[in-house]
Image (tube, rainbow, N blue to C red):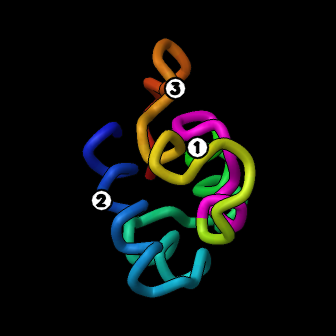
């Protein structure tokens, strides 16, 4: 899951579309992607794109101990 969300974050900065990235990375629901992204990074994909919340450089690092271990499918 860690590699998947890290790759999704990189792709998000290129595509700038939460929906497209969620679908591209195999999430059946955009809300599921957004929830997992927020658990991992501490901010929503939209906030990540906007650069709000913590400094964007800090936001690209996962929150220790809060990454989801559930599988997606």
Please tell me which residue is depicted at 36% across the width and 73% down the height of the picture. 11
Q: Earlier in the sequence, mark 3 or mark 1?
A: 1
The answer to whether residue 54 is above or below residue 63 is below
Label ID, residue 7: 2
Secondary structure at badge 3 equals: loop
Overall secondary structure of the magenta section: helix
| Residue 27 point in image, percent of width and height | 50, 62
Please tell me which residue is depicted at 45% across the width and 86% down the height of the picture. 15
Q: Earlier in the sequence, mark 2 or mark 1?
A: 2
- The residue identified by callout 3 is 63
**3 vs 1, front mark:** 3
Q: Residue furthest left?
A: 3
Please tell me which residue is depicted at 64% across the width and 37% down the height of the picture. 42
| Residue 37 point in image, percent of width and height | 57, 48
Q: Could you tell me how far apart the alpha carbons at marks 3 and 1 are, in whole angstroms?
A: 12 Å
Secondary structure at badge 1 equals: helix
- The residue identified by callout 1 is 36
**3 vs 2, front mark:** 3
Span highlighted in magenta in the image: 39-48
Q: Is residue 67 left or right of residue 19?
A: left
| Residue 72 point in image, percent of width and height | 45, 46
Please tell me which residue is depicted at 53% across the width and 44% down the height of the picture. 59
User: Closer to the camera, 4 or 26?
Assistant: 4
């Amino acid at each position: 899951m860690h590699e998947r969300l890290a790759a999704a974050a990189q792709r998000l900065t290129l595509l700038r579309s939460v929906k497209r990235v969620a679908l591209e990375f195999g999430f059946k629901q955009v809300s599921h992607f957004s929830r997992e992204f927020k658990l991992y990074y501490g901010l929503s994909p939209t906030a990540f794109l906007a650069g709000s919340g913590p400094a964007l450089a800090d936001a690209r690092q996962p929150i220790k101990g809060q990454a989801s271990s559930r599988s997606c499918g």
